[in-house]
Structure formats: structure tokens, C-alpha cells
Amino acid sequence: MASYDPFSRGPHPVGVATFDVTVVEGDRTVPVEVWYPATAEHAGQDLDPDTQDSFALMPGIEGMTQQAVRDATPIGDPCPGVVFSHGFAGHRRQTTHLCTHLASHGYVVASPDHVGNTTAEIMSMMVEGMPEDMEGYVRQVAADRPRDASRTLDALISGELGVKALDDGAGMAGHSFGGWTTLTTTARDDRIVAALPLAPAGGHSDTNVGPAQPIYDLVELDWGRRVPTLMIVADEDSVLALDGMHDLLARGESLDRMVVIVNADHFHFCDGVELVHDMMAPLMGGQTKKSSEFVPGAHAYDVTNGLGLIHFDATIRKLPDAIALSERDPKELLAERGIAVELVTS
């Protein structure tokens, strides 16, 4: 097992490309970011600021980077596929630390923008006025998201995204509303054989911030089959409170393991934790601390990247070393890296 290190970057340089995928003909097209293992000629370029990809989140917000090489040459062989779903007011590149980490270990990962519910669109709504029927808006977004995710998986398996995923079972991950999307898509799409919801919405809590009730009503937890699922959540989540995570754990038949990052908040699952947290803090109900008082973002990335890879390697690839690590207490495993977590089981 000494050679298997799920916390370190994998052996492959990572390429990235963007495609438009039609979800509903003539009605709905979404941009999809896809990360994949690239050929050895790109070695080191994904980690070099001079050659890695940079992008603008939206007009006026430029200079963002990700550890991947734009349009690098893919290795050519089909890889296990994973779909990632962003949060409410998020975007397809919000959690590139996980997506590129998985790709460096041999996965092809695709993340759609859930059009109508992205950062740029919500910011525009906040300026121009939020929908009068907010519950109706949330219900429409909830209807769109699982369709976006399954259509993205179609495109991965078919090779439509320039790289081809294996067709014998895929993983899905997502944060916040994307965690809800992970749970609900898994209920509907039996190609998903492993799930990694991060601070998912859908649990009941009186202290949740935002339009939580329709999301609670619509989450689908009766999957009709067993799907290995690992929830990773934050103990001081000021958007989706920890008791809501316990509620999900109690209601979902496949939800039997939850890792709680100690001294973390809702945005510890996004790139640039400290920047994003302090930017969003005024909207978080006044119930949070400064980012400097929480665990460093790098620690949260170790938890998500390492445990997420172990989970997918153990359940999708069925790697013996990953299975052995998945059977260890994550509290002990992360303590070896100086990171505090708790394990909760149903």
C-alpha cells in the first residue's frame, strides 16, 4: 500500500476543455468543463502558472486559474467517469481542486454549468431583482439539474466531450445544491454506482439559509438499489447546518457514512476557500467567523481529494489498496496528516 497515495497528485498531467451540450433540443444548452488525463508531453505544465489554464469567471472577474492545461492531448484510453455538480450560485469550475485531482489519477470528470443558477446569473438577479416566485424558480432549477447531470454523463460515455468514459459505472459528486443534485440524480440514473455529496442540501434544519424548503421536499433518497455513498460535510456550516446533514443521513438508505471536517464552514469545498468565504460571509446570516479562524482551505482539500479518491477507487475501480484505506477510520487516517475529522454512521 506504500505506493498508493490518494492525497498526492496522481501520475497524469491534467488537460481541460470546454464543450456546449444540448440538454433539451432547441431549449437548453449548457457549457461543460471536462478534465482528463493528458499525455506525458504535458508533464508539469498543469502545475506551472505559466502554462496552466486561466479563465474569467464572468466579465470583470478575470485571472482565475486551474491546475490543468487547456486543450491538452488526452491519453486516448477510456477512463472511469465522474460528473460534478456545482452549488446554488456556483459555476462549473468552482471545485477544480477535486476535479483535477481525480483526473490526475486517471478519471475523466465533467461539470456542467446549471444554466439559470450560476454565479453570474444570481449576481445579475441580485442587481435587477430576484424572481417574485422564488419557490417556483427553485423548483424549476431542481427540475433542470438532474437532467443536466445525466445528459453530461451521456456525453462522457459517448465521447462527445473529446474523451471517452467507460460505460460500466460512473461516479457523481457535488457541493451544496450540487450535493442535492448528486443525491437526486443517483436516484434516477442507475449508471451512477458511487456518490460523493459534499455539504448537500435537502436535509431539514430550522437554521438553513435560503430557499431550503422546496429543496428538502424534492430530494430523492429512495434509490431502489444500493449505491456506496460518502458524505463529507462541515461542522460549522452556516448555510446548510449540520443537523440537516444528520437528517439526510437518517433518511437515506444508502447514506450510512458521513465525515465531518472540524472547524470548517460551507465554502471549504470550493476553490479559494478564504476568498470565497469572506466574500459570502455577509450573506450567511451573521452566523460565521472570519476565514482566518477556520481550518485552512488546504486541509479541507486534503479531506475531499483524498477521501473522495479513495471512495471512487474502492467502489468504481475496486482497487485493493483503496478498499483497505476505505475500511480504516478516517479520523485516524486524517490525524496522520494533522487534520481533524469525525466519522458519523447511521
Image (cartoon, helix red, strand yellow):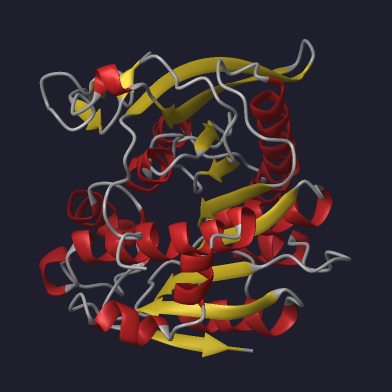
Residue at 37% in and 80% down: 235
Q: How far across and down, in percent of the image, does residue 136 sit?
A: 73, 45
Is residue 229 something that shows in the picture?
Answer: yes
The mark tally for this picture is 0
Residue at 53% in and 40% down: 130
Return the residue nearer the eye: 21 or 4. 4
Q: How far across and down, in percent of the image, does residue 69 sit?
A: 29, 21
In the displayed structure image, the side of residue 154 where residue 130 appears, left or right: left
Is residue 205 something that shows in the picture?
Answer: no
Quadrant showing the C terminus: bottom right
Residue at 46% in and 70% down: 232
Quadrant showing the N terminus: bottom left
Residue at 15% in and 67% down: 290
Return the residue nearer the eye: 89 or 306. 306
Return the residue nearer the eye: 59 or 309. 309
Q: How far across and down, in percent of the image, does residue 333 sit?
A: 33, 80
Q: Is residue 345 above or below residue 102?
A: below
In the displayed structure image, the side of residue 203 where residue 169 appears, left or right: right
Q: How far across and down, in percent of the image, does residue 242 sit?
A: 47, 80
Q: Is residue 122 above or below residue 329?
A: above
In the displayed structure image, the side of residue 224 where residue 27 appears, left or right: left
Name the residue furthest top: 26
Q: Dividing the picture into quarters, in which one does residue 144 lie? A: top right
Q: Dividing the picture into quarters, in which one does residue 332 lie? A: bottom left
In the displayed structure image, the side of residue 42 where residue 185 appears, left or right: right
